[in-house]
Amino acid sequence: MSKRQTIAVRRDFDVIVARSRVRDLARSMGLGTSDQARISLATSSVARVLGLGGSNQGEIVIESANGQDRACVRVTCTFETSDDDAGGPSSAKFAEARSMTDEMTVEKLPDNGVRVVLVKWV
């Protein structure tokens, strides 16, 4: 598995593919089965909140990264909102994903998009 993959999410199946690839990367980096499950579940949870694969299209970027003297799996989910949904989801809707990761940020983008970054340290 490469160090960085971008998956365009156009339908529900793309979220399933992303979840599987997150788990594969986590396994290859040495995360235990529980942590593999947590980061992959957090990925699909965020995708569900963002409506990826359903009402919204976007992308999921999966990568290994280094920082603070250790490695991590980082997953970035991004989508662009429609004008009707310019407020975007609130960070409170991501509580489930936040509980399964070591770090999580929710950022509203200038083009009315939303970016959610999940991190699970090895």
Image (spheres, rainbow, N blue to C red):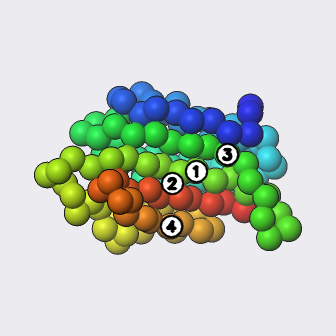
| Mark 4: few/some/many CA within 10 Å (<14, 14-19, 20+) | few
- The image quadrant where one finds the C terminus is bottom right
User: Viewed as shown, does residue 114 lie left or right of 112?
Assistant: right
Q: Position of residue 25 (x, y in %)?
A: 71, 41
**Residue tagged by mark 4?**
105
User: Disc 3 designates what residue?
Assistant: 63
Cα distance between the residues tagged 2 and 4? 13 Å
Where does the image place residue 85, in percent across and percent down from the top left?
A: 19, 54
Q: What residue type is labelled 3?
A: Glu
Q: Is mark 3 on a helix, strand or loop?
A: strand
Residue at the spot of label 1: 75
- Residue 65: image quadrant is bottom right
Q: Nearer the viewer, residue 76 or 27?
A: 76
Residues tagged 1 and 3 counted as in contact (Cβ below 8 A): yes
Does dot 2 land on a helix, a strand or a loop? helix
Can you give x and y, in whole percent of width and height, for residue 51 in the image? Answer: 30, 45
